[in-house]
């Protein structure tokens, strides 16, 4: 069997997971998570992890294994992915990656940069600088230090901002210059890259329905548990949509209808950013725009056969 990898990306609530299961059943595939928020143990509802029923349909890997208290990087994910791919091939299965985290897909298609280790004293100093300055001012300092990050790192992305700052400060080279020097470790594989795009009206409906489902499944209790853990606020897990909003609900600052509306708005904005990111980084991917899973399924099966 030739070495194949299928990548299925798309905006949040576009139905990627459902499609991946359908494909996996038809081609003897196994699904590997490519969503940075679905790795966390404590968030199954807000991160929209596959249900127990879905997990029984085909094998799923790298979902809900990482404690929220620990920092988890793209590099750590890639190490686990390499082992998982080898295991799939050993079992004569095709790895199907599904998710919405662009950097994870970049790690597979283009590789991870070999950035030298940054001395802990430098890292600590920069973290203190960010904390003292605040993210808005720190981002402006980062832009002055490394103009290449403009439009590539979001102003509110604390973790990536700190990382870009420490890399430029220590190596005198932009993190994005390091990225250009990288190569994929899967160059000998046939990689089928699919980006699922759905009509805007359909996506908005999906987002709204998913928000309602989250509350039916008691995402409020999930957030209560998380807040009691007193997690470091700089960790990216705090950015899961719904955490801040439900915290505001619990404190009485927002009503339930207001919380749902804010979550819907933020999720729509996130989906838009994912599509924009894909436009800039996934120009060579197959864009499949359809309402029908069956037609998408046929196209993917034809492409990968």
Image (tube, rainbow, N blue to C red):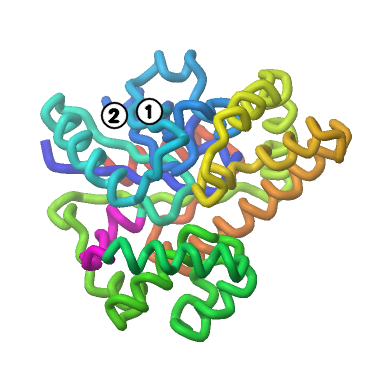
Q: x%, y% of residue 71?
A: 40, 44
Q: In the rendered view, would you say 29 is above or below 170?
A: above
Say left or right for 208 vs 68. Answer: right
Instruction: Specify which label sits upstream in the sequence, 2 or 1.
Output: 2
Q: Secondary structure at mark 1?
A: loop
Q: In the rendered view, would you say 68 is above or below 146?
A: above
Q: Secondary structure at mark 2?
A: strand
The circle on residue 163 is none
Instruction: Tell me if residue 283 can be seen.
Output: no
The circle on residue 65 is 1
The magenta-colored residue range is 106-118
Task: Say which residue appears at 24% left-offset and 34% top-offset.
Answer: 94
Spatial CA span between label 2 and label 1 = 21 Å
Task: Say which residue appears at 40% left-offset and 56% top-offset.
Answer: 103
Q: x%, y% of residue 117?
A: 23, 63
Please name whichever residue, 169 or 160, is drawn nearer the observer in this view of the structure.
169
Task: Say which residue appears at 35% left-offset and 49% top-offset.
Answer: 73
Task: Say which residue appears at 47% left-offset and 76% top-offset.
Answer: 149
Q: x%, y% of residue 59?
A: 33, 21
Residue at the spot of label 2: 29
Say left or right for 188 vs 250. Answer: left
């Amino acid at each position: 069997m030739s070495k194949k990898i299928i990548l299925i990306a798309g905006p949040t609530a576009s139905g990627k997971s459902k499609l991946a299961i359908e494909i996996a059943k038809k081609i003897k595939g196994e699904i590997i998570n490519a969503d940075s928020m679905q790795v966390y143990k404590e968030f199954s509802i807000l991160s929209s992890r596959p249900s127990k029923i879905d997990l029984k349909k085909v094998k799923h890997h790298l979902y809900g294994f990482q404690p929220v208290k620990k920092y988890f990087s793209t590099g750590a994910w890639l190490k686990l992915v390499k082992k998982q791919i080898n295991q799939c091939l050993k079992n004569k299965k095709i790895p199907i990656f599904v998710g919405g985290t662009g950097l994870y897909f970049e790690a597979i298609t283009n590789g991870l940069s070999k950035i030298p280790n940054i001395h802990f004293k430098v890292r600590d100093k920069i973290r203190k600088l960010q904390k003292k300055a605040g993210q808005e001012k720190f981002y402006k300092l980062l832009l002055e230090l490394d103009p290449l990050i403009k439009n590539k790192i979001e102003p509110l992305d604390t973790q990536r901002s700190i990382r870009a700052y420490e890399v430029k400060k220590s190596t005198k080279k932009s993190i994005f210059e390091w990225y250009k020097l990288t190569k994929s470790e899967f160059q000998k594989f046939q990689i089928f890259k699919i980006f699922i795009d759905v009509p805007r009206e359909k996506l908005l409906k999906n987002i709204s329905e998913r928000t309602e489902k989250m509350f039916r499944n008691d995402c409020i209790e999930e957030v209560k548990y998380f807040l009691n853990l007193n997690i470091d606020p700089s960790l990216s897990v705090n950015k899961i949509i719904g955490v801040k909003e439900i915290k505001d609900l619990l404190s009485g600052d927002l009503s339930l209808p207001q919380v749902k509306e804010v979550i819907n708005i933020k999720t729509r904005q996130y989906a838009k950013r994912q599509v924009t990111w894909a436009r800039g980084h996934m120009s060579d991917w197959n864009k499949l725009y359809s309402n029908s899973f069956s037609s998408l399924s046929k196209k993917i099966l034809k492409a990968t056969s």
